[in-house]
Amino acid sequence: MRVWLARGSPISLKEQLSAQLLLGILSGRYKAGEKLPSVRELARHLQIHSNTVSAAYRGLAARGWVSARTGSGVFVRPTGLQKSEDPRDDLVRTFVAAGAAQGFTLAELQDALARFSSLAHPRSLVVADPDLEFAQVLAAEISEGLGAPVRFTSIKRLLQKPAEDQLALITAAHLAKVPANFPNRVIRLKTIQDVVAGQIRPPGPVLIAVVSRSDEIHHWSLKLLAALGFPPDSVTHHNPRDPKWKDGLASCDIVAADRIAAAELPAGIPAIRFQLVAEDFIAELRAAPVQVQ
């Protein structure tokens, strides 16, 4: 298990560890049912107090991401992210599990699926998230990967105005906000290893600018950069919604921006354009029988 921790950071070791474990679950790196290292084993590996690991595990368990089994250990709970050789298997599992939870027999579900298939409705894709700016960034990445427009909306609006021809794309963090029978796919996000792959850390102190309209992206970047050893005072946050968001950008050693914010940067500001959605998830969407409109 690869985890980065920065000692002496204002972001506690527990928060750094929790954020990376959760990102590992959201990205699918840690599979449903997988046993995580024991508290003692992970504490020894990371050279931190066992109470820190135990607190991180308890926090994840309280939010439903892992389960602790007495005498057995800590295991990742199912989130809809587990992969198989055929991505269609995951869709069928989700469909059958949701139907069984509502009391339908397998025969009844097969009949409903047959009737639905005969309608041959095309499904348009829509990314939904409580943070509308975050939804827009994810939609832009998926749209670029598919070569077709993908809409975005808030989860609240998605539920207020459902449409028969749309398939919602939602991150696992917010999957519980939609009914079990609501047509959806879980967006797999990149791991921290994937995000920083190929990037060379500059020697010595650096000043990093994170540019995004999304509060969620700023929140995550603060924790993950701290885990990589960058203190909070070396990271500046710039939101194009703010009148003076361009101030200080030219003085930063590294400017990292999402798909949307990168297009708003002033001319002459070189930037690293980071991606959040896993490439293999976009590849699955391209291969799935979903008509993008």
Image (spheres, rainbow, N blue to C red):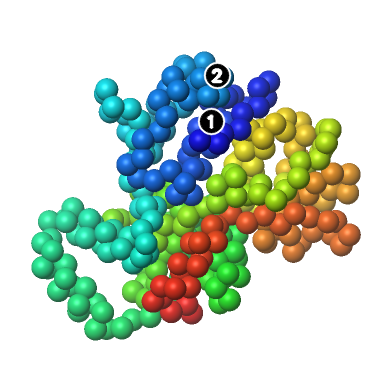
Q: What amino acid is found at the position of numbered circle 1 in the picture?
A: Leu
- Label 1 near label 2: C-beta < 8 Å? yes
Q: Residue 31: image x %, image y %? A: 39, 46
Q: Residue 63: image x %, image y %? A: 39, 35
Q: Is residue 86 above or below residue 236?
A: below
- How many numbered callouts? 2
| Horizontal relation, residue 189 to residue 67: left or right | right
Give the residue drawn at x 80%, y 46%: 254
Badge 1 density bin: few <14, some 14–19, many ≥20, Cα 10 Å: many
Q: Residue 240: image x %, image y %? A: 73, 54
- The front one of 155 and 103 is 103
Q: Can you see residue 94?
A: yes
Q: Can you see residue 182?
A: no
Q: What residue is shown with label 1?
A: 17
Badge 2 density bin: few <14, some 14–19, many ≥20, Cα 10 Å: some
- The front one of 272 and 243 is 272
Q: Is residue 175 above or below residue 34?
A: below
Measure how far apart labels 2 and 1 are at the Cα level: 11 Å
Q: What residue is shown with label 2?
A: 48
| Horizontal relation, residue 228 to residue 57: left or right | right
Q: Residue 207: image x %, image y %? A: 81, 39
Q: What amino acid is found at the position of numbered circle 2 in the picture?
A: Ile
Q: Residue 234 is drawn in which quadrant?
A: top right
Callout in the foreground (2, 1): 2
Give the residue drawn at x 27%, y 64%: 92
Q: Residue 277 is drawn in which quadrant?
A: bottom right
Give the residue drawn at x 24%, y 83%: 118
| Horizontal relation, residue 234 to residue 223: left or right | right
